[in-house]
Amino acid sequence: MSAPAISTLPDGIDLADPDSYVDRLPLEWFRRLREEAPVVWHPEPSPNKGFWAVTRYDDLTAVHMDWATYSSEVGAVALEELDQEQLDVRRSMLETDPPRHTAMRKVCSKRFSARGVRVYEDWIREVARGVLDRALAPDEPFDFVSEISRELPIRFLCSIFTVPQDDAPQLIAWGDKMIANQDPELSAAVVDKVDTEAYRLLPFRSPIAHDVFAYADRQRDERIEQPSDDVIQALVTAQSEGLLDDRDYHNYFSLLMIAGNETTRHTISAGMLALLERPDQLRLLQQEPERIPVAVEEVLRWATPVLHFRRTATRDTELRGQSIREGDKVVTWYISANHDPDVFEDPDTFDVTRAPNDHVTFGPGGPHFCLGAHLARLETRVLFQELLPRLASIEPAGQVERIRSNFVNGIKRMPVRITTR
Ligand code: HEM
């Protein structure tokens, strides 16, 4: 494909409106953009000023690799435009450029490496079995999201943080309210509907952050009294060595809790829905479970729970013939890159045997490649390894409902009827 000379946003496309994602994922918009306007200026409602929408795989990759031109730190990584005070107070590793970013990431990168997460496999399997035992007990319709997908990731996180499993329901509720801040069913502080000015200095502009910070403080106090060998301890040690201040500690803790919760949940739900709709592929994985690790990559591509992240240009530059000015927001759409036919043959087909599968669900690489990628892969694999052999049948038992968000691609309700073997 060659780039068109003039790039204007095709009529009828609105990637910024959270309502655009409620009824369906607008894959046809992204196809049009990749073909007609792969790097295009996209207006936004005030007070935001608009952004460049980047929809092709190779452009997204170029932006993420060139962190000096496309900064995570100068203007943060979400669509929301922050003033300097907000930026300073809310900054986590995600909104930091190297070299500071490199030092922050090192605090727990070993614990999230492939080898680091392998030690959790038995633990995770045990948690998965417990949740499945409870959810699959009655042969009655139930909501797959609330009983299975929603339960698992935070319980896994409790194991890794070594906090009590009894805290899981509270952490899940906090996580939901913070990240789903565009969905009135999940959060009272819906950012584009009510006045959230009072929360402007909190992560996700959410009042729930106060509760999460207080919880993080209690965890720190416990570890100062009685050191432990876990991720929170790594943060506490980094703070005692002066690498993180109080605010960094809070933001780091919240980032891990939030980033590892919803994303994995939506991956599990999207994977189950895709298999439920394609009984032949479900059967293939049940008959040949050794295919599950490859299938997990396709589930991740299909799910793409994070729709986009944003960078900010640090200088005037050019991308696919478009003139980007210093300070412009540049928004890279993972969901579109994961459906780019230049990289994925037949991209709108779910194929559990797809290989290679170089999806960008965790980012394309570069400094901010998802810290939890190995953990998320492990959790998703273990869940399907435990779940699929138990399924004699699975069918829909009601309407699938999607989250109202231009950032999170997720299913909030998925009633199913399951019979077990
Ligand atoms: C399927 C599940 C997940 C998805 C789809 C996902 C997606 C992403 C994406 C797209 C990024 C930004 C990549 C970039 O800018 O290039 C990211 C960063 C990050 N993720 Fe994940 N994530 C998942 C699970 C997790 C888990 C389980 C954790 C940890 C508990 C986690 C922790 C993080 C952190 C800390 C960052 C920031 C890394 C940095 O700035 O260096 N993620 N994730």
Image (cartoon, rainbow, N blue to C red):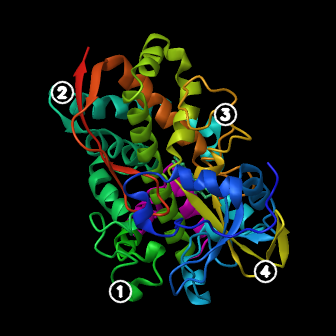
- Magenta stretch, main secondary structure, is helix
- Residue 313's mark? none
Q: Earlier in the sequence, mark 1 or mark 2?
A: 2
Q: CA distance from mark 4 to mark 1?
A: 31 Å
Which residue, given by chain and number where applicable, does mark 4 sit on?
A: 325
Q: CA distance from mark 1 to mark 2?
A: 44 Å
- Residue 357's mark? 3
- Amino acid carrying label 4: it is Arg
Q: CA distance from mark 3 to mark 2?
A: 35 Å
Q: Earlier in the sequence, mark 4 or mark 1?
A: 1
Residue 364 seen from this side: yes
Asked whether the beta carbons under mark 1 and mark 2 sit within 8 Å of each other, the answer is no
- Residue 195's mark? 1
Q: Quadrant of residue 77?
A: bottom right
Residue 374: image location, x then y, percent? 59, 40
Label 4 SS: loop
Quarter of the image with the C terminus is top left
Label 2 SS: loop
Residue mark closest to the camera, 4 vs 2: 4
Residue mark closest to the camera, 4 vs 1: 4
- Boundaries of the magenta span: 216-245
Badge 1: residue crowd in 10 Å (few <14, some 14–19, many ≥20): few
Badge 2: residue crowd in 10 Å (few <14, some 14–19, many ≥20): few
- Which residue shows up at 57% across the image and 89% down it? 85
- Which residue shows up at 26% across the image and 44% down it? 399
